Amino acid sequence: MDHHSVAAVDTAPQGYGTDPNLVTPHTPWARTLSERERALVAALADIVLPGTAEYPAPSAMGIVDFFDDWVSAPYKTQQGHRPVITTGLAMVDAEAQGQFGTGFVELDGSRQRTIVDRIASTTTADRSFFTRFRSLLLTGYFTSDIGFKAIGYVGNVPLLAFPGVPPEAQRIIDDELGKLGL
């Protein structure tokens, strides 16, 4: 019998941690947008998706934190979006400086909209920024509690009976299936 001891090796899978706390969410990574970039996100978001009497503007419901979490995340997709967003924000501010001699955030609403209209209508790299910005804005807003309310989404709730697809929605589905030959 060999009297040499061998240390036990723990071969159990270690996993990646626990499920996220969705009641009081916390992002485990540091947010990386500067205060200026955060102010630019707020100003742009409120122009692209203005608030109403019933639903607040994106800046009032936390969209800046959504953007900061998104572009700060250590994942490949988000890291790919980071330079598009940060470079685009800098471009918006530079455009304001060039046209009006001051930063975008400091402009009045009319001048801000002039810059946004130009960016939204171009076919250059400016457009890719605006397209990504708008996509993230709509995703963040309409997947929040406020956004769910705005679109009438009630989520996963128990029903006593399933009422079926509304007739107008069924017509659209049938039309689209017909176009596909199905």
Image (tube, helix red, strand yellow):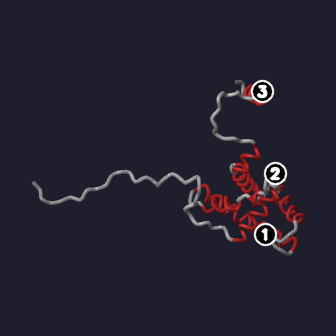
Q: In the rendered image, which residue does mark 1 sit on?
A: 93
Instruction: Work out which quarter of the rendered image holds the C terminus and state it.
Output: top right
Q: Could you tell me which residue is drawn at 12 percent across and 59 percent down?
A: 3
Q: Nearer the viewer, residue 145 or 34?
A: 145
Mark 2: amino acid: Glu
Q: In the rendered image, which residue does mark 2 sit on?
A: 54
Q: Could you tell me which residue is drawn at 79 percent across and 71 percent down?
A: 94
Q: In the rendered image, which residue does mark 3 sit on?
A: 167
- Which element carries disc 3, helix, strand or loop? helix
Mark 1: amino acid: Asp
Between discs 2 and 1, the one toward the N terminus: 2
Looking at the rendered image, the disc whose residue lies closer to the viewer, 2 or 1, is 2
- Which element carries disc 2, helix, strand or loop? loop
Whether residue 41 sits left or right of residue 4 in the image: it is right
- The single residue placed furthest to the bottom in the displayed view is 101
Q: Position of residue 16 (x, y in %)?
A: 46, 54
Question: Are there few (<14), some (14-19), or many (20+) residues within 10 Å of tag 2?
Answer: few
Image quadrant in which you'd find residue 167:
top right
Q: Could you tell me which residue is drawn at 85 percent across and 60 percent down?
A: 118
Mark 3: amino acid: Pro
- The single residue placed furthest to the right in the displayed view is 110
Q: Position of residue 61 (x, y in %)?
A: 73, 58
